[in-house]
Image: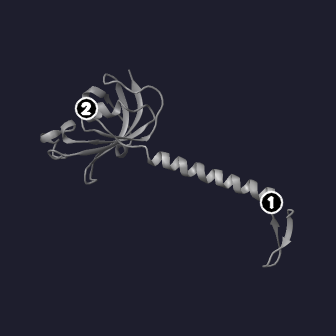
Amino acid sequence: MAGGRRPSPHGGYHRVFSFPEHRILKALITTLLASTVLAGAAYAQAPAVTTSSGLVYESLKEGSGESPKATDTVKVHYRGTLADGKEFDSSYKRGEPTEFPLNRVIPCWTEGVQRMKPGGKAKLTCPPSIAYGAAGAGGVIPPNATLQFEVELVSVRR
């Protein structure tokens, strides 16, 4: 069938694709759909990593550049929650990122943030043994609490 204009059953005219046009359009749509599905599947399959310490690390957004060392100072935005989802701290709510030496925080952070690169974002699930343990913290974090942090690594200073 040659391409052109044909009468529409509802009045007026519509364009009719010729066979080569139809085949090209169908191939393009199929390719776009397949690449979208594959990209989504790859993202969904990026597994969380559980380290020997018990840290569960899940990359939410890959950064670029060098990962920090334990002796570096990092600037981060973060949100901390208890296992039930109750938020106990957030630099986002304070409106500015926080800066600290990476070796002066809970072991979960020292280990987890070293896996990140500037511009990256990750979720850290911290068992009590590498968080605040049996002591808890300041009446805000109960004893033996598993903590979750969403961390965005803004910058690294060596």
- Return the residue nearer the eye: 157 or 129: 129
Q: Which mark is residue 86?
A: none
Residue 71 lies left or right of residue 121; in this view the side is left
Q: Earlier in the sequence, mark 1 or mark 2?
A: 1
Q: Rounded to the nearest whole Å, what is the CA distance between mark 1 and mark 2?
A: 65 Å
Residue name at image x 24 percent, y 32 percent = 107
- Return the residue nearer the eye: 42 or 72: 42
Q: What is the crowding at mark 2: few (fewer than 14 residues within 10 Å), some, or many (at least 20)?
A: few
Q: What is the crowding at mark 1: few (fewer than 14 residues within 10 Å), some, or many (at least 20)?
A: few
Quadrant occupied by the N terminus: bottom right
Residue name at image x 22 percent, y 42 percent = 127
Give the residue type that dot 2 points to. Answer: Val
Rendered location of residue 105, percent (x, y): 25, 32
Which residue ends up furthest to the left in the rendered image? 134
Disc 1 element: helix
Rendered location of residue 78, percent (x, y): 35, 41
Q: Nearer the viewer, mark 1 or mark 2?
A: 1
In the rendered image, which residue does mark 2 sit on?
105
Residue 38 lies left or right of residue 31; in this view the side is left
Looking at the image, residue 53 lies above or below residue 60: above
Give the residue type that dot 1 points to. Answer: Phe
Residue name at image x 25 percent, y 28 percent = 104
Residue 10 lies left or right of residue 117; in this view the side is right
In the rendered image, which residue does mark 1 sit on?
19
Residue 50 lies left or right of residue 23; in this view the side is left
Disc 2 element: loop
Quadrant occupied by the C terminus: top left
Looking at the image, residue 90 lies above or below residue 66: below
Which residue ends up furthest to the bottom in the rendered image? 10
- Return the residue nearer the eye: 128 or 4: 4
